Image (cartoon, grey):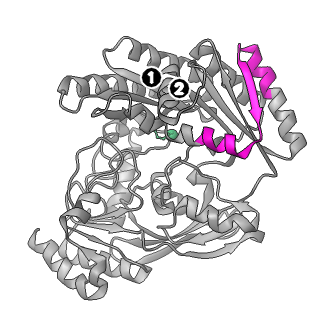
Amino acid sequence: MSDAASRVVETLRPLLGDRLATSEAVRAHHSRDMSRLPARMPDAVVFPRTEEEVQAIVQACAREGVPIVAFGAGSSMEGHTIPIRGGISVDTREMNAIVEVRPEDFLAVVQPGVTRKQLNEHLRDTGMMFSVDPGADASLGGMASTRGSGTTAVRYGTMRENVMALRVVLADGTVVHTGSRAKKSSTGYDLTHLFVGAEGTLGIITELTMRLHPIPETVSSAVCAFETVKDAVEAVIATVQYGIPVARVEFMDEVAVAATNNYSKLDLKVAPTLFFEFHGTPAWVAEQSEIAEAVTREYGGQDFRWSTDPEERARLWQARHDSYFATKAIKPGYDLYTGDICVPISRLAESILASREDIDASPLTGQIIGHVGDGNFHTAYLIDPDDPEHLAEADRLAERAIERALAVGGTASGEHGVGTEKIKHMRKEHGDAVDVMKRIKAALDPDGLMNPGKMGHAG
Ligand code: MLT
Ligand code: ZN
């Protein structure tokens, strides 16, 4: 540990006691996230419970010039929480209080370590729900920081649409409150949405005001197989362009379906497949499901089986959420190299088909799944971590997919974020706006201590 980090530990020990850890095991847990990216140990890990404690931690680090990296549930996909320059990992898991719920105003105020499942359990009797569902039981602070989304964004929006207000400890220890409880506002720079997606590079979120939605009276889901990837994706484009208000529409290619059948013990037909979900009153759900069925049939969709059985639905969505693990299980010992591009919906079919063709022409095994109602899809390539040619080939495929996305006005990441690896695409995507981002970073974090080496520093 550096002398500076030791001094931070000495300063914080009396305040935090055993909520300051330097053991190998705890540091190792905070050295990585869900990605394949190389681990790097923090010097120490702290577990604050209050905003005042976060402030004290940030001030101690600022005095000594020690990096500060916020850590939620560790489920980020791009190395966001890896302390690539060492320093203090600030684990928010003990900041897990639900401060206030106001169903009548459709909002809840929470600390950043509250997870999405915890919030939904808590809300159950209120008739409200928190909608954003990335699959993992991520922390809300982490989801806000990565501007996460997932399967329900097509209907309810991403974290961008669902964070109303924040409290944030800045790099100098100042606390700011951004946003309001009003549904809309036309005052001031939109600082809430500056911190949403900042990946902990501008400050540490200590409280979030989240938008809630009524729990739908009826939920129905359907699975539908297609002859070709093109048919499946064109069916989605038509569904979205018809304005059918799907709550979720997810795509899985054949490789993903076969892996899911194995891993989750399902017997889905091994074919390009769409999973749909509809929310609303029974009559509305029945009508929308029928329209969607008619649209999918036009594109050769087979066996559009829809069901309102909660158990069947839960099994299906759990299987979809476990897709990442199912794919990893295809080749034990291999890493998953994931992509996350997002394109305008009209360019989705050509983008997915080109990525699928690239995989077919490559020696790597790969699959495509996606939150296709948003034009967002994930490529996943299985790579042998000990074979540098595999990594080079995955880099090449990912690069091609991103180049194609940017060429049609898309983005290098729809929901996973920038982390350490997507920085190299920032200038291609944002041009000179990257320099504005750097100026914002320099203004708010002049010593570069907030999650250093990530967004705002490089690119
Ligand atoms: C998902 O959609 O399942 C997640 O974003 C993780 C993944 O890329 O597989
Ligand atoms: Zn996803």
Spot occupied by residue 202 in the image (x, y as percentages of width and height): 38, 62
Q: Is residue 376 visible?
A: no
SS at badge 1: helix
Closer to the observer: label 1 or label 2? 2
Circle 1: residue type: Arg
Q: Is residue 412 left or right of residue 424?
A: right
Q: Label 1: few (<14), some or many (≥20) within 10 Å?
A: many
Residue 73, by quadrant, is bottom left
Say if the magenta span includes residue 363. no
- Mark 1 or 2, nearer chain start: 2
Give SS at disc 2.
Answer: helix
Q: Which residue is mark 2?
A: 257
Position in image of residue 50 (x %, y %): 43, 80
Q: Position of residue 363 (x, y in %)?
A: 30, 15
Is 408 drawn above or below residue 29 in the view shown?
Answer: above
Residue 309 magenta: yes
The three-letter amino acid code for the residue at tag 2 is Val
Rendered view: 17 above or below 270: below
Q: Which residues are magenta?
A: 292-317
Please name the residue shown 47% across and 67% down the image. 113
**In the rendered picture of this protein, how many numbered marks are placed on residues?**
2
Q: Nearer the viewer, residue 117 or 442?
A: 117
In the picture, the quarter occupied by the C terminus is top left
At horizontal 41% and vertical 45% (from top left) the residue drawn is 433
Is 215 left or right of 33, judged from the image as shown? right
Quote the CA–CA distance across marks 1 and 2: 25 Å
Q: Does residue 140 sit above or below 368 in this rendering?
A: below
The image quadrant that residue 406 belongs to is: top left
Q: Is residue 147 above or below residue 181?
A: above
Q: Residue at x 76, y 36 (%)?
A: 307
Label drawn at residue 404: 1
